[in-house]
């Protein structure tokens, strides 16, 4: 469990340092072109997810996301105490990742977010983003577990572009991004709405994945 918690905390820390750091760098180099900044942010995040899931997945499962941990708890894949511990280190790691990104770019460490992200379209986007992410993970685990790193990275890269919220899809990420005024930030007041939408999306994904799994046998991967 100690190794798993270390992997979850470290993975979430590195993920947030990439999300925030690439947002800062992308915005700086884009010269005001938001599309270029978003592309840089999405590409860096997707790349980091692929690497982190591949390297840390065998240790902890590479959740890096309380919504994923809750889904695994609902499905009985992890115990209650372990799930609570996972979520705690994910939040701590996420906050530490934001502070690390600020330090790397010589910014004020603590800076409450000011970027408005609220309203029905934003909440719907977060629900859809989280639903798609959890469905990708749950069905991927059943049908092709070895492809999970590529599946998650690909989905998040796409979700940056097809959702109005740019796909936070992660309560720990949302809390941490409320501590930055950079490109990746969100106002603290907007955090509860995002998290509620994310949890609703996750719950729907668990239900749909369960229904789909009960109607078709799992696909067996060929061994080497």
Image (spheres, rainbow, N blue to C red):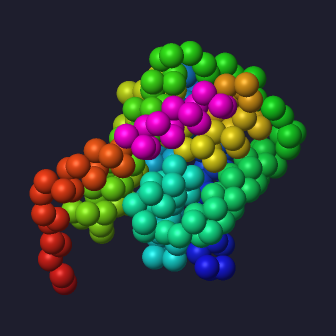
Residue 128 belongs to magenta span: no
Q: Quadrant of the N terminus?
A: bottom right
Q: Which residues are magenta?
A: 191-204
Task: Say whether residue 7 is visible.
Answer: no
Instruction: From this view, report whether residue 145 is shown above or below residue 101.
Output: below
Instruction: From this view, report whether residue 175 is shown above or below residue 75.
Output: above
Image-based side of 71 in relation to 151, left or right: right
Residue 21: x %, y % from top left: 66, 44
Instruction: From this view, report whether residue 54 is shown above or below residue 187.
Output: below
> Which residue is pictured at 40% across the width and 32% down the height?
128
Image-based side of 207 in relation to 192, left or right: left
Q: Quadrant of the C terminus?
A: bottom left
> Residue 40 versus residue 156: which sits nearer the camera?
156
Image-based side of 112 in relation to 54, left or right: right
> Which residue is pictured at 43% across the width and 37% down the height?
201
> Residue 191 versus residue 209: which sits nearer the camera?
209
Task: Say whether residue 121 is visible.
Answer: yes
> Which secondary structure dominates the residues rendered in magenta?
helix
Residue 185: x %, y % from top left: 68, 31
Instruction: From this view, report whether residue 99 is shown above or below residue 41.
Output: below
Residue 105, quarter of the rendered image: top right
Residue 44: x %, y % from top left: 51, 47
> Residue 46 versus residue 172: which sits nearer the camera?
172
Number of callouts: 0
Residue 194 belongs to magenta span: yes
> Which residue is pictured at 28% across the width and 53% down the height?
210
Residue 93: x %, y % from top left: 70, 58
Image-based side of 21 in relation to 209, left or right: right
> Which residue is pictured at 51% across the width and 24% down the height?
123
């Amino acid at each position: 469990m100690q190794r798993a918690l270390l992997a979850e905390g470290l993975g979430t820390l590195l993920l947030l340092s990439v999300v925030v750091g690439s947002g800062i760098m992308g915005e700086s180099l884009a010269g005001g072109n938001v599309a270029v900044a978003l592309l840089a942010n999405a590409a860096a995040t997707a790349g980091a997810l692929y690497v982190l899931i591949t390297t840390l997945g065998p240790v902890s499962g590479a959740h890096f996301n309380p919504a994923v941990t809750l889904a695994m708890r609902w499905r009985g894949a992890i115990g209650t105490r372990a799930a609570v511990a996972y979520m705690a280190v994910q939040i701590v790691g996420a906050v530490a990742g934001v502070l690390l990104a600020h330090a790397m770019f010589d910014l004020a460490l603590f800076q409450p977010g000011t970027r408005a992200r609220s309203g029905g379209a934003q909440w719907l986007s977060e629900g859809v983003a989280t639903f798609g992410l959890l469905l990708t993970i749950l069905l991927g685990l059943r049908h092709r577990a070895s492809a999970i790193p590529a599946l998650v990275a690909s989905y998040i890269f796409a979700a940056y572009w097809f959702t109005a919220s740019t796909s936070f899809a992660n309560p720990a990420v949302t809390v941490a991004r409320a501590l930055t005024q950079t490109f990746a930030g969100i106002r603290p007041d907007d955090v509860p709405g995002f998290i509620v939408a994310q949890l609703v999306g996750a719950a729907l994904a668990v239900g749909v994945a369960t229904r789909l799994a009960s109607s078709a046998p799992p696909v067996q991967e060929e061994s080497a």
